[in-house]
Image (tube, grey):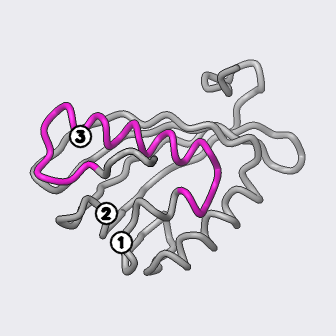
Amino acid sequence: MPAPIIKPPFTLATARAKVQSAEDAWNSRDPERVALAYSENSEWRNRTEFFTGRDAIKEFLRRKWAKELDYRLMKELWAFTDNRISVRFEYEWHDATGQWFRTHGNEHWEFDDEGLMRRRDMSANDYPIKEAARRYRKEA
């Protein structure tokens, strides 16, 4: 049975749990699983891309993870209010040539009454790293 959806208003404990749930879902690299956390008409800004809806989210994630290989993410709660959460994140990945990157950024989330994310606003920067400098590795 799936875990119950965490709904607003958020407390420190539920905001942390919401962030951990998102980290776990994104680390699965399963677009279908990830998309279930978003409302049917969720609005996204991801860097310079703007789109709406679960189908667009799934397509975006398929493209993302086809390019960002061996993706591993860490999310950290930064701030929250009744129905909004902000996180800072880092993730690591490599491209088709084997060059590793670390991406730093932040996300601002807004949730509907059912606990689904209706808006996601993300900004990030990538920079190359050596494989030995990686911080985030898949757990055994």
Look at 49% across and 75% down and name the residue there.
Answer: 54
Q: Is residue 9 above or below residue 21?
A: below
Q: Residues within 10 Å of mark 2 (few under 14, many from 20)?
A: many
Q: Secondary structure at mark 1?
A: strand
Counting from the top left corner in percent of width and height, residue 27 is at: 59, 42
Start-end of magenta stretch: 6-33
Q: Is 93 or 1 nearer to us in this picture?
A: 1
The percent position of residue 20, horizontal first and vertical second, equals: 39, 36
Q: Which residue is mark 1?
A: 39
Q: CA distance from mark 1 to mark 2?
A: 5 Å
Callout 3: helix, strand or loop? helix
- Give the mark, 3 or 1, whose residue is nearer the N terminus: 3
- Image location (x, y in percent) of residue 84: 19, 54
Q: Residue 29, percent across and down? A: 64, 50
In the rendered view, would you say 43 is above or below 3?
A: below
Q: Tell me if mark 1 has few (under 14), some (14-19) or many (20+) residues whose alpha carbon lies within 10 angstroms of its own.
A: some
Q: Which mark is residue 17?
A: none
Residue at which label 3 appears: 15
> Is disc 2 placed on a helix, strand or loop?
loop
22 inside magenta stretch: yes
State the residue at coordinates (11%, 51%).
9
Residue lying at the far right of the rendered structure? 97
The one nearer the camera, 10 or 107, is 10
Taking 81 as reference, is 124 left or right? right
Q: Which residue is mark 2?
A: 116
Quarter of the image with the C terminus is top right
Toward the front, the furthest residue is: 1
Distance, label 3 to label 1, CA atoms, is 18 Å
Mark closest to the chain's N terminus, 1 or 2: 1
The residue under label 1 is which amino acid type? Ser
Hey, which quadrant is residue 3 in on the image?
A: top left
